[in-house]
Image (tube, rainbow, N blue to C red):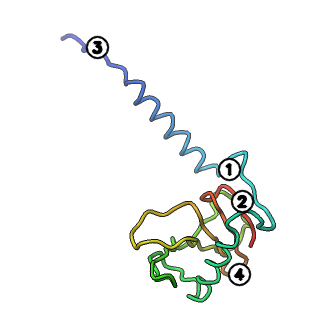
Amino acid sequence: MHALPRSRPSWAVRLAAVLAAAISLVALTGVVPADAAVYNSCTISRCADARSARSTWAAKGFPTSAGWYTWPDGRHNYTGGRHYNREGQLPTNATYYEYDVYSRTQGAARDAYRIVVNRSTGVTWFSPNHYTDFYRL
């Protein structure tokens, strides 16, 4: 019986395996990108929009279940439910929930702008780049 020659996986398959391993390692260790930061105030552009969204979500009682909610402009906004602080950037030992800042047509893709609310204290953080940076409102 002759042994068949073993073929090597293509470079794309090997690259995908390496990237998957790296992503898994980051998820397990909670490594945060070197340029990530948490700021004690919010003075960047869009902070006013984040504050306005916070006010509207507060009026809705900061819903805790993920889903679409009607918005004052006649469109909808989405809350993803619990935010687990996997990045480890926000204070620990708190329960956080995440809410989108900008309304849109129900079912439309989400953008990167979020507010994250500590349900115990009401402290709210704005992330303009999907949890890379946080600005306290």
Of residues 129 and 18, the one drawn nearer to the viewer in this rendering:
129
Q: In which quarter of the image is residue 87?
A: bottom right
The local crowd at label 4, few if under 14, some if 14 to 19, many if 20 or more residues have their Cα within 10 Å, is few
Location of the C terminus (image quadrant): bottom right
Q: Earlier in the sequence, mark 1 or mark 4?
A: 1
SS at circle 4: loop
x and y percentages locating residue 109 in the rendered image: 44, 62
Query: Looking at the image, do the residues carrying marks 1 and 2 touch, with CB atoms under 8 Å apart?
Result: yes
Q: Residue at x 63, y 70 (%)?
A: 115
x and y percentages locating residue 11 in the rendered image: 42, 24
Residue identifier under label 4: 122
Amino acid at circle 2: Gln
Residue identifier under label 3: 5
SS at circle 2: loop
Image disc number at residue 89 = 2
- Give the Cα separation between the discs numbered 1 and 4: 25 Å
Is residue 5 found left or right of 56 in the rendered image? left
The local crowd at label 2, few if under 14, some if 14 to 19, many if 20 or more residues have their Cα within 10 Å, is some
Amino acid at circle 3: Pro
Is residue 123 found left or right of 18 in the rendered image? right
Amino acid at circle 1: Val
Q: In which quarter of the image is residue 48?
A: bottom right
x and y percentages locating residue 55 in the rendered image: 64, 83
Position of residue 23 relative to residue 110, above or below, is above
In this rendering, the count of numbered labels is: 4
